[in-house]
Amino acid sequence: MSQLVRQESPLNTEPYSKELATSFVTPNDLVFNRNHDSVIKADAPESNDTNWSIGISIEDDERLKDLHLSSQSLPLDSLKKEHDLVEVTATLECAGNRRAELASSHQPAEGIQWGNAVIANVVWGGASLRSVLLRAGVPDPFSHHSDLTQLEPSAEASLSDCAEWARPLHLHLFSAQESTESDDPTRKEYFAASIPLPTALHPNQHCLLAYEYNGTPLTQRHGAPLRAVIPGHVGARWVKWLNGVRVSARENESPPMRQDYKLLVPSGAEDGEKELKEKAKDGSEFRKEELRKERPLQRLEASCSITMPWKDGQTIEVGEKGMVEVKGYAVGQDGSPATQVFVAIVPEAEEEKSSEDVLASLAADLEWKQAAIRTQDGQSDQRKADSKWSWAWTLWQLDLPVPPSDKKWALIARCVTASGVEQEKISQWNLRGFHNRSWSVVRNLSIKSS
């Protein structure tokens, strides 16, 4: 496996970032592995098309009494026969991507110290989740619109555009993977997550019940035989080994959702970070109380990252024309792709000890160079024309002029989406190191003439 093994059991790996952004569509062997528990084995009796099924149900709740949906079980082979194969190019990204970068400016966040390669752009294939739910009897909360193709798939627009009955509801996504992270010894619990029901049913959100990636069957380590694809959302929502969905009036509270994927931020700066880490140790009542106050992380915001040069402290060669090649990826937000990437190079001052120091000291008149981008070249012209929304990443490249000098240099990159959303400059530190969307910085670079 050409990946960095961050943890062997359970399996957690990421590819080398210098290899990641060489292809618009990430090859299967470069798709990262993120697991809370053991991978469901391929030789398990139920792990095939004939035996695997997905349950579709509705919670027994007075608030759902007007939804006339009967529980049913849909075998995987029937799912494939009854629903067209739909392909969606979408970026899968772990909530902890770029976590390690926070440590240069802050207390180390909890969890695996991921680099910037816990991300993959894949052509996912499967049945439309919207189609499956509608066929099962869930009403269409967007049926009152005459042109569904124009509906914006952002969180705010999804809620405002849908029928009122659907706004407070959720769809639970259940995995066959047993959870060992439960804080309740009296229960046997499994990995699960939920998304708002309007998200699941939105015609332009392009959620899938996927059984293929890049034109081949899913492998066990990536969720075979069936997984959820929830574009624009953290990887924890893309539930693997999916064996059930349920309409509910409440959010899912599986162990990872109630104990993990939430942003716990300090009340102050460095002292506040230390205090939070001390008070919020695993199992503490303070931690449980703080977690109860927060809602789990759902959507990811715009971000970009430099993958070449791929790490701090490198010596990089300048070409004959005095240029340095810089590459990376960028992701959009709410179906609006990253369409502009800007890169700058600055000399590092001795007092700048971290990436945030570099960002905080940038001059207002800093000269930015716009990178050349590759957006949807992984799709056919017809598929591009069929939708105004994109869930794929952008790859970008730039030959950047570098003045001759013995100084140390820092590269900075930032992106803007098609709808004008700008990547945030500095993300707030949080206990678990989730959702780092800061401008990308590669520091302490030495320049060598070729």
Image: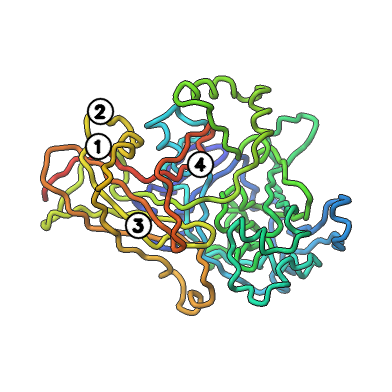
Q: Secondary structure at mark 3?
A: strand
Closer mark to the observer between disc 2 and disc 1: 2
Q: Residues within 10 Å of mark 2 (few under 14, many from 20)?
A: few
Name the residue furthest bottom: 382
Q: Is residue 43 above or below residue 408?
A: below
Q: Secondary structure at mark 1?
A: strand
The residue drawn where x is 30% and y is 46% is 412
CA distance separating discs 2 and 1:
12 Å
Question: Crowdedness of circle 4 by 10 Å Cα count: few (<14), some, many (20+)?
Answer: many
The residue pinned by badge 4 equals 96
Q: Residues within 10 Å of mark 3 (few under 14, many from 20)?
A: many
SS type, badge 4: loop
Give the mark nearer the N terminus: 2 vs 1: 2
Q: State the separation of the CA atoms marked 2 and 3.
A: 28 Å
The residue shown at (42%, 60%) is 338
Which residue type carries mark 2? Glu
Nearer to us of marks 4 and 3 is 3
How many angstroms separate mark 1 from mark 4 (CA)?
24 Å
Asked if the residue at tag 1 contacts the one at tag 3, i.e. Cβ–Cβ closer than 8 Å, the answer is no
Distance from the alpha carbon under mark 4 to that under mark 2: 29 Å
Q: How is the image coloured?
A: rainbow
Which residue matches tag 2? 351
Say whether residue 28 is left or right of residue 182.
Answer: left
Q: Is residue 356 left or right of residue 436?
A: left
